[in-house]
Image (cartoon, rainbow, N blue to C red):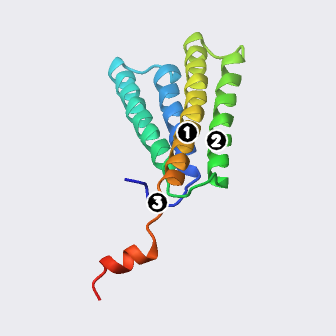
Amino acid sequence: MPERRKARTGTVSGLALMTGATAMAAVGGGHHSVFATILLALLALGMAHAFTVEIQRQAHRRTGRWDRHDVINIALLAGWAFVALTIAALPYPSFSVRVLSLLLTFSYTAACAYFVAERRRAIAGAVRAPAPSASVMSESSPV
């Protein structure tokens, strides 16, 4: 069933940022207890799932073409990947923060590729399935 919601710009980027920030808090947040670290890691995994679902929802919208919202979503995800790579390249963070930053870089890059692939698939599906004609709709409606 195609998604009927309107295009949104901030949801994909916001979920990406919240997922990365939660994972960063779990890894480099200071002196957490083991329970707090595990809880933050599980929260980050749940947010990663919500992030993936939101990418699918935004990619499978009804519009049959690329929109400016799509370009903005890709640009924001690419920007977060660049920021994560920059953090990994800095000499100041700890080793665990650098490793997580590299993991986030690859994850955000994969999210960009996934969004593009899903959006292209949705657009190709919209082109293949023609809209019902007005005569078919008028015959089935009771008057």
Q: Residue at x 50, y 57 (%)?
A: 62
Rounded to the nearest angstrom, the CA distance separating label 1 from label 3 is 16 Å
Residue furthest top in the image = 95
Q: Are marks 2 and 1 in contact (CB under 8 Å)?
A: yes
Q: Which residue is mark 3?
A: 5
Residue furthest left in the image = 142
How many other residues sit within 10 Å of disc 3, few (<14), some (14-19) or many (≥20)? few
Toward which corner of the image does residue 53 lie, by quadrant? top left
How many other residues sit within 10 Å of disc 1, few (<14), some (14-19) or many (≥20)? many
Q: Does dot 1 land on a helix, a strand or a loop?
A: helix
> In the image, is residue 83 above or below residue 129?
above
Q: Residue at x 27, y 84 (%)?
A: 142
Toward which corner of the image does residue 77 lie, by quadrant? top right
Residue 58 x %, y %: 51, 49
* Comes first in the chain, label 1 or label 3: 3
Q: Which residue is mark 1?
A: 115
Q: Residue at x 51, y 53 (%)?
A: 126
Q: Residue at x 43, y 55 (%)?
A: 3
Horizontal side, residue 48 vs residue 113: left or right: left
Horizontal side, residue 91 vs residue 20: left or right: right
Rounded to the nearest angstrom, the CA distance separating label 3 from label 2 is 19 Å
* Comes first in the chain, label 3 or label 2: 3
Q: Which residue is mark 2?
A: 74
Residue 135 x %, y %: 42, 77
Amino acid type shown at disc 2? Ile
Rounded to the nearest angstrom, the CA distance separating label 2 from label 1 is 8 Å
Which is more toward the observer, 32 or 20? 20
> In the image, is residue 63 above or below residue 16?
below
